């Protein structure tokens, strides 16, 4: 049988209000009184309801993380970094998947607002995030974006150094003597467009004509790894290798890599002898292939930590009535050369 706050107060010899002050930290009490209350809590095994306590204080200690595509395990790594950072501040994330569907994203935001989250971190499905102006009109909570650059709503933003990462990868391939280099991205969005721009930048700098047909994108769909294996990127890779004689390929993320590498393996293309391969996104399995795959490594853990810090700083600024300008942070990538190029 659960103990009540009245029983705690009776055992400690104080009022119910005093017990509430101690447990919620809403009013200073004498150290000896606080000790009597906490001893009574321990003796009676009184269960404190942190959610109810937080709501009484006008906060839930919850941060919603709206993910555009949870099948992309990059976002799972971002979530781990976010969780680690928020835990330092006494907050917890709620992870929710939008499946690359803007309508689902909007519904996810509505549901999180109904759950009284204290802030939102969003990896948007589309660039247009103007709907937030309406949904947040009566909710004064901070928002931070990760991975994709939004339009229509200004807030903090954490991105990888996408242009630089792709540029360094293609520059390396050019230095190895490749001229017919292609780029495949899982979908056309702001992030993939930045990586394609890094691809083009390296070619232009080397005096190599940019062949628009060598830049391909997949469907704007959320697909399982099984579906990705023979999806749009598989077909693009098949065409590029069979009909255009490319000698090197940069995939735009791990989703694109699933289709591209599946195609190369089924075609029995010799890597790197017949085709050099680099993927944007590092992963544990890239060292388990033969040959191991070179990668532009992002730092998703750090991206999550920075987003968590941004949200917390916004919350503290609002609490203290301090105005803060919006920030955009670029997290550097690292080119890791393995056996595929």
Image (cartoon, helix red, strand yellow):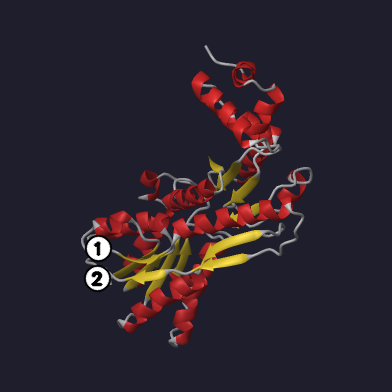
Question: Mark 1 — residue?
Answer: 292
Q: Which residue corresponds to the image point at 54% horizontal and 60% vertical from the top-left? A: 188
113 lies left or right of 200? right
- Residue 151: image x %, image y %? 68, 60
Image quadrant holding the C terminus, namely bottom left
The residue where tag 2 is placed is 272
Where on the picture, by quarter, is residue 172? Answer: bottom left
User: Quick one: which residue is furthest to the bottom in this view?
Assistant: 207
CA separation in Å, label 2 and label 1: 10 Å
Residue at 75% x, 60% y is: 323
List the single residue furthest toward the top: 1
Q: Position of residue 33 (x, y in %)?
A: 63, 30
Residue 236 vertical position relative to residue 247 in the rendered view, above or below:
above
Give SS at disc 2.
Answer: loop
Judge left or right: residue 240 versus residue 92. left
- Of mark 2 and mark 1, the one earlier in the sequence is 2
| Residue 276 location (% of width, % of height) | 29, 71
């Amino acid at each position: 049988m659960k103990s009540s706050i009245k029983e705690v107060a009776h055992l400690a010899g104080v009022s119910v209000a005093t017990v509430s002050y101690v447990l919620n930290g809403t009013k200073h009490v004498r150290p000896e009184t606080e000790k009597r209350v906490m001893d009574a809590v321990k003796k009676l095994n009184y269960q404190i309801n942190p959610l109810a306590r937080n709501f009484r204080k006008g906060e839930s200690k919850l941060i919603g993380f709206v993910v555009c595509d949870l099948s992309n395990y990059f976002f799972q790594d971002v979530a781990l970094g976010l969780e680690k950072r928020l835990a330092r501040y006494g907050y917890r994330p709620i992870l929710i998947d939008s499946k690359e569907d803007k309508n689902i994203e909007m519904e996810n935001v509505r549901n999180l607002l109904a759950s009284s989250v204290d802030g939102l971190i969003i990896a948007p499905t589309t660039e247009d995030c103007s709907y937030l102006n309406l949904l947040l009109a009566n909710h004064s909570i901070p928002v931070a974006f990760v991975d994709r650059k939004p339009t229509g709503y200004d807030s903090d933003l954490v991105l990888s150094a996408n242009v630089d990462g792709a540029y360094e990868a293609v520059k390396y391939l050019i230095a190895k003597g490749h001229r017919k280099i292609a780029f495949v991205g899982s979908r056309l969005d702001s992030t993939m467009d930045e990586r394609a721009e890094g691809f083009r930048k390296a070619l232009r700098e080397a005096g190599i004509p940019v062949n628009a047909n060598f830049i391909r994108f997949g469907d704007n769909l959320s697909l399982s790894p099984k579906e990705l294996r023979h999806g749009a990127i598989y077909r693009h890779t098949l065409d590029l290798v069979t009909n255009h004689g490319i000698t090197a390929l940069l995939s735009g993320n791990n989703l694109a890599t699933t289709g591209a590498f599946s195609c190369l393996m089924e075609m029995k293309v010799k890597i790197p002898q017949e085709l050099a391969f680099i993927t944007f996104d590092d992963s544990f399995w890239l060292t388990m292939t033969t040959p191991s795959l070179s990668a532009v490594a992002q730092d998703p853990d750090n991206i999550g930590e920075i987003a968590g810090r941004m949200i917390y700083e916004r919350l503290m600024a609002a609490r203290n009535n301090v105005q803060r300008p919006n920030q955009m942070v670029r997290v550097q990538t690292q080119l890791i050369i393995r056996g595929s190029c």
